[in-house]
Amino acid sequence: MSAIEQEDEDRETARFPGQRPPRASVGSHRIEEEVFGKAYDPRTVRRIWAFVRPYRRKIYLSVAAVLVFTATQLAIPLIIGRAIDSGMTQGGNTTNLLWAMGAFALAVLLNYGASYMQETQVGQVAEHVLFDMRRAMFAQLQRVSLSFMDKTEVGRLMSRLQGDVNSMQEFLETSVISVGDMVLLIGIIVVLLSLDFRLGLLTLSTMPVLFVVRIFWLPRAKRAFWAAHETNSITAGAMAEGINGVRTVQNLDRQKVNFDLFDDKAYSNLQTQLTGSRYAQVMVPIVDSLTGIAMAIVVVVGGSLVLNGGLEIGVIVAFLFYIQRFFDPIRSLTMQYSIMQRAMTSGRRITEVLDVPASITDKPDAITLTREMDGSVEFRDVVFGYSDDRPVLKNVSFTVKPGETVALVGPTGSGKTSAMSLVHRFYEVQSGAVLVGGHDVRDVTQESLGEQVAMVLQEPFLFTGTVFDNIRYNKASASLDDVIAACQAVGAHDFIMRLPGGYDSVLEQRGSNLSLGQRQLLSFARALVADAKILVLDEATANIDSYTERQIQKALVTLLKGRTGMVIAHRLATIRGADRIIVLQNGELIESGNHEELMPKGGLYAKLYNMNYASFDDIPDELVAKVNARAAST
Amino acid sequence: MTTDKAGRVHSRGDAQAHVAAAHAGKGQSPLLRITLYSLRHPWRAAAAIGATIIASVLQLLIPRLLGRAVDQAQNILSIGAQEAEQALFWSAVTLLVVSVARGFFTLCQNYFSESVGHHVGYELRLAFYDKVQRLPYAYHDRVHTGDLITMGLLDLDGVRMFFATGLVRVVLLSVLIGVGAYMLLTTDLLLGFLALSFVPFVAWRSSVAQLTLRKTWLMLQDKLSALTRVMEENLGGIRVVRAFSGQKFELGKFDHASKEALELSHQRVLIRVRNTSAMTFSFFAAMGLVLWAGGNKVIAGEMSVGTLASFLTFMTILQMPVRQLGLMVNSFARASTCGNRLFAFIDEPLTIEDKPGVPDLKVSEGVLRFEDVQFTYPGALYPTLDGITFEARAGQTIGIVGAPGSGKSTLAHLIPRFYDLTGGRITIDGQDVSQVSLHSLRRAVAVVQQDSFLFTTTIENNIAYGDPWSKESRIERAAESAQLHNYILGLPLQYGTVVGERGVSLSGGQRQRLSIARSLVLKPAVMVFDDSTAAIDAGTEHRIRSAIRRYAKDRVTLVISHRLSSLLHADIILFLEDGKIVERGSHEELLAMGGRYRALYDLQTRPDNDVHFGSAAE
């Protein structure tokens, strides 16, 4: 078989021109569920009200302002009508006109004041509530247990902190206005009927028509708008993916396929946008026609009433003015319903976050761990698991003496990382106890525990900000000199000085402009500045080039000097340098001792060591399994 | 193209034409260029503008008709009843017809102008996307991805909406204000002036307000994205936060960012409210003046009540559009800045593209040659690579080693022409890589990158990324060679499992294996591993290597690594330092040489024995 035939055999071919490849897509998009829920949910409303309550005076004030504002809007056509009827005929009465002008001026001033008052108050309250809600959620997320954070996607939380909070804001801003709309609607009805009952009734008969039309129109239009919104996000997602992955796209020569697939998405977006547009615009002629009908009624019927002497001309003018404003409140009130539905769903989602229990809290009589404690760490019969039925650590006991460095060693899944997290009380033990400086970690304040136990994680995490701020982090007392001293000690000073702004250089996008090794060194410096008595460190597994690697090893020595150290060690150099090695397997402590003591025992450690890999992580899982099997059989 | 339910595609075939059209008009001012681009839909544009003119004229007729009806009703007692009723009836009918027609033409105005906008948006999106894909690495190195995304979303919107919110509004306002003013002033000069007196004030206030709001909006976006970053980094780095007990510190950062955003939001509310209240006030004040002066005229017998009523309704009709004048000004400002950015991007010259009429690359023997290759990054003072010369034949493996920054990855990127050389040449079977089509070159050369992008789609689609027509057998074979097949079988949906940002997350090593599988699917003539096994353990790497060696006899393999164990089997190893090859030879030869390679080897095989921690060290 020639190479060409082979080529054809394992590739599919297009069955018709323009067919898209079978295994290709661009962009990904989480389809958000369309919201058609309840528009009023008393429990959620109560929770939301708790946030609005502090500002309730302003809310009352703005509702009052809305009422005044609406009243003036209602009054102005009336005043004009009165002005016309009370002497606006040839040779009529100027005094009456003057009175009318006075009333008009008063109404306009009130209108101005009320609208100013209402809009500033409502706008600011809504902004305040928005920020307060977001802060409450954010503060809650600082307290909730890490097990919750472990299983929750950051993107999901962010959409609650932003999208949901924004729809609450929209709801607050519009709801006061809709109070005004409601009053305006009722006001217009009352005024029209009281000006002239028959004419009012006839004119108002066009109103229910609009209601009915909108009831039919709304669900369909909402679906069309939703589809337009969705396809728009899909297209935007595909575009963002094309930008983020552009190097890989060019590398694998996918431009043509991607262009066609993107075209598909963009074109379907065009179609849904046009449909949405049609739905939005179809209401215009309907409202205009109804306005036309209402005006025609006023002219014909009003005219004949004037003829019969039953109506004055000013009333007709007032009617015509009201008709111009007639349908606005109906339009915005029906929109408000959708906004309420959305707000209820968002409100529920926000309260869900607020209700996540903070499972790890300080005891009321918790003591403060001070620097004077001895710096020992003890695990006493610790049982721990992320769920009750699957223990990750089974009855583990050991003690780390003050100033000692202990290496935790073991295959993946042996419970090393969990053991480390317990020292910092990221999770609660199921039974037994973890003691730091002789105190159960549950008896001391979390804040003081954090001050005495510094941690270096496997993946160095940097924040956007200057190098200085990153290294100093939470330790406000640290000066630039302290930071520089720390960086010199870990060997990061030289490369920092080579950055364009030295210690003031801003690390973009979590330090993506630095290499992994450099980021590791910065996280070492951060731990050094924190100057804790106990250091817990998870050594990086990723392969770093040999030069940086050497630098990191040296930094590690500096970092551990004069501190109690617990290191999850991957590198032989680190392991051999430790005072004591603790070997974990399947959540149990199986060996403990220094290198010289463990080697003659011929246990798991000796076997792994003898395989001569530069790092324990290089050893393939299968070999570890084999060693274990052998160990089990002997 | 649209796909029906059967998966068939209806060809539109003009996507490329849209892209080409977007490139026309280089050098024009952005507003002119947007206008001309929008007019590529002449029928829709003409319908929109025609409807706008008709709708605004009809709009202006309504106050007249109302005024006449009022007069007819008032005079009803003086004229004969029958006659008067008939006149009123016809007035009513005319009003109704005009209203319905106005509604219809307003619909046309809005729909067609939005439609032009949506079409323009669709076409510019294609052009934008096309350009993103074509611009070379050098461009993408320079420009932040976030800025590109903003350009593709917000700037594109600013340009797209210009027709509807800018141009059509100019027509609308000119007709309404122009014709309206003519009608008012010819009816009664004084009253006309009074009725129009609010127009300049509102136009001015609303323009100032919109421009200020736009400026503060951009500032607010900055503040909000700072706030977002604080939240995102906090949640992403929650372990660091907890490890350093930084919760209070983080809340402090949040409050600081939040406070700044809140203050700016408040400021914006005030700007908006001050202006809208002032505009409403000026409108009503003008109305009051009209009422006063008109009322006196009626009393003096110089004007009918109907004419006064028509003046007042004129004003209510003019009110909304005049307020929108600010939006129009804003639309011009926005389209101008957005258009500048977007078109500058579309006009960005392609420094790497097919030279006219170049042939496809034909691989026969599979010989890759570097001839005195020199490369300097744009803006850099020193060359990253200098005087690189070597030859590799099919079946051979070349190892490349060197300290970070020695130019290893750059060398890999030159072969598929991600960058163009600044000196020397690279050939494959005697054909200069810059003299063949990019498409054929990149098919023949696969670079497995250090961190390849993982697309949020199934594993299968990810592996078949370079050749989405691959059958399952081919995909599975590649995954097997990359030692990923067994892992995939353990996943819930196996090859159909979605990975990436919104799917199952893969470890660094798994990602690297996936990108190896991706390249294997292509069956390339030259395969470059650019430090692409760093996160894979040595044992698995060994198995990958022996699995792909079976297919490697027709292929040149380049392995870039800092882990010497990855290079042991290479036929030739090149040691790079500061962009130059300082040592070359096989592993044994280099060891015997006792130079830099030897030193690195010693460093890696004999870890420091003097490392010692803690108390025992003292």
Image: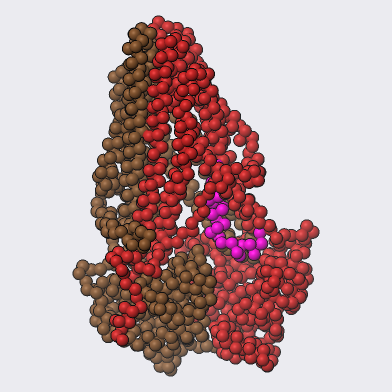
Q: Residue furthest top?
A: A91
Q: Residue furthest right?
A: A365
Q: How many marks?
A: 0
Residue A383, position in %: x, y?
73, 73
Q: Does residue A137 lie above or below B370 as drawn?
A: above
Residue in the picture at 56% in, 47% down: A37
Task: Identify the colour of chain A in the image.
Answer: red
Whether residue B506 is visible here, answered yes or no, is: no
Q: According to the image, what is the colour scheme of the structure?
A: by chain
Work out whether residue B167 or residue A522 is closer to the camera in this orientation and state it.
B167
Q: State which quarter of the image contains the C terminus of chain A.
A: bottom right
Whether residue B503 is visible here, answered yes or no, is: yes
* Left or right of A457 on screen, residue B80: left
* Left or right of B332 on screen, residue A217: right
Residue in the picture at 42% in, 70% down: B461
Q: Does residue B427 lie above or below A89 as drawn?
A: below
- Tell me the magenta residue range: A143-171
Q: Residue furthest left?
A: B357
Q: Is residue A150 magenta?
A: yes
Residue A211, position in %: x, y?
48, 34
Chain coloured brown = B
* Left or right of B425 on screen, residue A288: right
Residue B24, position in %: x, y?
24, 53
Residue B533, position in %: x, y?
46, 79
Q: Secondary structure of the magenta portion, mostly?
A: helix
Q: Is residue A182 magenta?
A: no
Work out whether residue B130 or residue A481 is closer to the camera in this orientation and state it.
B130
Q: Does residue A141 lie above or below A432 as drawn?
A: above
Residue in the picture at 66% in, 72% down: A418
| Quarter location, residue A520 | bottom right
Q: State which quarter of the image contains the N terminus of chain A.
A: bottom left
Residue in the picture at 50% in, 83% down: B540
